[in-house]
Amino acid sequence: LLRLFNPRPAWVDRETLYRLTTRAAPQEIPEGMMPVMTDFAESLWFTPPVSDPENGVWWLDGLPHAAVVVEKLRTPPEPGTLTGEKARGEKTVNALMDTFPEGTLLCMTIVVQPQDTLEERFTRLSKNAVGENTESIRARQDVATVKEYLGNRHKLYRAGISFLLRAEDMDSLKRKRVALTTALLGAGLQPVRPEFDVGPLNSWLRALPMCFDPDTDRKQWYTRLMWVQHLAGLLPVTGRETGTGHPGFSFFNRGGDVLTFDPLNKMDRTQNAHLLLFGPTGAGKSATLCSSLSQIMAVHRPRLFIAEAGNSFGLLADYFESLGLSVNKISVKPGTGVSLPPFADAHLLVAQGQTLQDVDEQTLPDIDDDTQDENEDQRDILGEMEISARMMITGGDPKEEAALKRADRAMIREALLMATHTTYREGRQMLPADLQSALWEISRDSQRNELRRTKAAEMAEALGMFTQPGSFEAELFNREGAL
């Protein structure tokens, strides 16, 4: 905005103004020094703007500024209509924004509205269209069509699209407006003709960031209903981004340039990285993941744990194994004899000297915290065992997980340590059945209050899902094995 409102200052060098007038970050203010309470809007203006109602422009630093408002869509916009690279002709590949005049700014205002209230308005419109004349019949038909789309989970939002232009003089501004109008019409967007824009100065102001107030648009003069699918096609989410430059995941953007980023590089993320990859059957999700995992393996050689249904990564595992990497394939299904003991490392707690006196509900760490030091090599074995126990007790149900109190967590840890010491003395591996026995023992402890004993019995019964003889869960988790 500083560059928009001060395009050509005559009283100071432009780049010097941009560099020196940025707001100081809080950490740059010396300790004990009171900050300067500068108004944000005042910090953006250094030369008062001049309105020109006759020409419908704003003069900023002697340069005319105007807004071109899009009246309606003529054709449904495809994804990346404005900023996506597309073939135009036999040899030309560019984005629509490339054809816009220099200095054009895109401004989109989207007003999200409840669909139920919108549907009520359509219902009233249909009821008011009484009679058998042509207009009434068409109105009822249109309402029925729109309601059918809404029933198919399509949404209607109110939106306004504007383009801000700047030029050296009025003649140049008119030429830029003609060039922009030509480009927009070719893309299926019809702008408002200048002579029909009743408030061109206000149109420029409304298009500025955070300057549109939906409460002042009660009659919807400045926004129109648009399908969210069309808005998604107009959003400037595709472009010429080339990533961070750190090889990890390598792709090509729509212009053919290499796009790279690395989720395992600390410079490319702030916390643990997550990826959501979705698409219809046959879109190439598994192929994309196989390619990405191969690149990550080549760069970082991490330890991969891939859980899947359908053997989509079987060939990738064979490929890794052919290159000399250690690969362990496990098919988890009844009768395969696979055992995944969740408490296989419980004996390490005894080696670390963990005792029952170490459990204090007031000092329990937050095992769900993702901001722990990643360079710390010391494992929190008891915390890992607690997570496994909580998953088995609650079944992963968010409501049951939220109902667990700190006292419940402390009791789970106490039962884990009890089972650990018991199995260590017996010289065998700890199983979920041992944790269940420890919880039953706590539930029979007469020195505890009734509520705690009841809670222990409830958790012990929940563990029965994983200890019942003959069940697949017991075959998988309640047998000794190695991870």
Image (cartoon, helix red, strand yellow):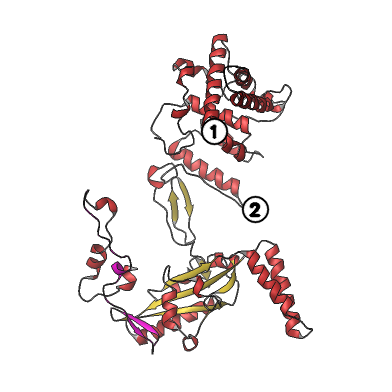
Q: Is residue 320 visible?
A: yes
Mark earlier in primary sequence (1, 2)? 2
Q: In the depicted view, which residue is nearer to us: 335 or 365? A: 365
Q: In the depicted view, which residue is nearer to us: 117 or 338? A: 117
Q: Which residue bears the numbered disc 1?
A: 405
Magenta span: predominant SS is loop
Bin the neighbour count of mark 2 within 10 Å (Cα to Cα): few under 14, some 14-19, many 20 and up. few
Q: In the depicted view, which residue is nearer to us: 18 or 353? A: 353
The Cα atoms of the two marked residues, 1 and 2, are separated by 41 Å
Q: Judge whether residue 49 is colored magenta.
A: yes
Asked where in the image residue 405 lies, by quadrant, the reply is top right
What is the magenta range? 32-61
The kind of residue tagged 1 is Lys
Query: Image height check: is 325 above or below 26?
Result: above
Query: Mark 1, mark 2: which one is toward the viewer?
Result: 1
Q: Identify the residue shown where x is 46% and y is 37%.
A: 369
- The location of residue 404, given as percent across then percent down, is 57, 33
Drawn side of residue 216 relative to residue 455, left or right: left
The secondary element bearing badge 2 is classed as loop
Asked where in the image residue 466 lies, by quadrant, the reply is top right
- The location of residue 60, given as percent across then percent down, is 31, 78
Asked where in the image residue 67 lies, by quadrant, the reply is bottom left
- The location of residue 87, given as percent across then percent down, is 52, 68
Quarter of the rendering occupied by the C terminus:
top right
- The location of residue 247, given as percent across then percent down, is 42, 46
* Residue at the limit of the structure toward the top, as seen here: 426
Q: Which residue bears the numbered disc 2?
A: 280
Residue 358: image tag: none
Q: Identify the residue shown where x is 74% and y is 82%.
A: 136
